[in-house]
Image (spheres, rainbow, N blue to C red):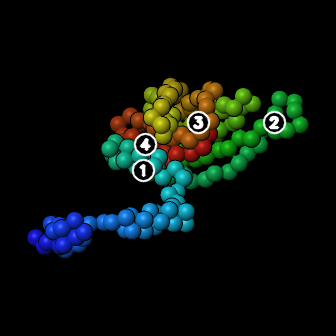
Amino acid sequence: MTTVNGPDGPQGTGLGLAPLDEGDLSVLAELRETVTRLDPCPAGLTERIGFALTVRALQAEVAELTRHPGALTRGDGDDEPDQATTVTFSTDSVSIMVTVTAGRDGTARVDGWITCEADEVELGRPDGGSERVEVQDGRFVFGSIACGPAYLVVHPRGERTVITPTFSI
């Protein structure tokens, strides 16, 4: 081990380096502020990391987004149509299509169709919350749900679990 004479006498750092002083700490603080300002952490990164870890833990198959067209539907007699977004996710064995229709009360309706045999579909949230609905003839509906980021989890009978990437409701 190397011993360095620092301001407080001999220091056994093992690296031959003096301990950090106030000037060093000031430079590091300025560097942290500069990096945070010029190259901030991407929005949602921690949620995506959590999602990736969950997928790995489940050893699930991740569905890929295959298309994202927007569609307009007729409103309730208003001049303004309601906005609906249709998203399709697919894997080698399963396709999942969902249409998200925004409600006027800040909630949304999610209508979905899957191409596999499954008893239920789970709508998960990055914060850990989730809801489950029954699948009937390949169709499922989440009635009035809060808007925000979500992902779907499907447990096909006899197949690996399928998880979609996070999408906005």
Task: Identify the element where label 3 is drawn.
Answer: strand
Left/right placement of residue 122 relative to residue 67 reads: left
Indicate which disc, 3 or 4, sits on the residue closer to the N terminus: 3
Q: Is there CB contact under 8 Å for labels 4 and 1?
A: no
Q: Is there CB contact under 8 Å for labels 2 and 3?
A: no
Question: Foreground: 97 or 49?
Answer: 49
Neighbourhood count class around disc 4 (C-alpha, 10 Å): few under 14, some 14–19, many 20 upward:
many
Indicate which disc, 2 or 3, sits on the residue closer to the N terminus: 2
Neighbourhood count class around disc 3 (C-alpha, 10 Å): few under 14, some 14–19, many 20 upward:
many
Question: Residue 139 sits in which quadrant?
Answer: top right
Indicate which disc, 4 or 1, sits on the residue closer to the N terminus: 1
Question: Foreground: 90 or 128?
Answer: 128
Any part of residue 90 in sight: no
Q: CA distance from mark 4 to mark 2?
A: 33 Å
Nearest-to-viewer mark from 4 and 1: 1
- Determine whether 54 is above or below 134 in the image: below
Indicate which disc, 1 or 3, sits on the residue closer to the N terminus: 1
Q: Which residue is mark 3?
A: 112
Left/right placement of residue 8 relative to residue 117 reads: left
Q: CA distance from mark 1 to mark 2?
A: 38 Å
Q: CA distance from mark 2 to mark 3?
A: 19 Å
- Determine whether 76 is above or below 20 in the image: above
Which residue type carries mark 4?
Answer: Val
Q: CA distance from mark 1 to mark 3?
A: 26 Å
Which residue type carries mark 3?
Answer: Gly
Q: Which residue is mark 4?
A: 162
Q: Is there CB contact under 8 Å for labels 3 and 4?
A: no
Q: CA distance from mark 3 to mark 4?
A: 14 Å
Which residue type carries mark 2?
Answer: Arg
Q: Which residue is mark 1?
A: 49
Q: Which residue is mark 2?
A: 74
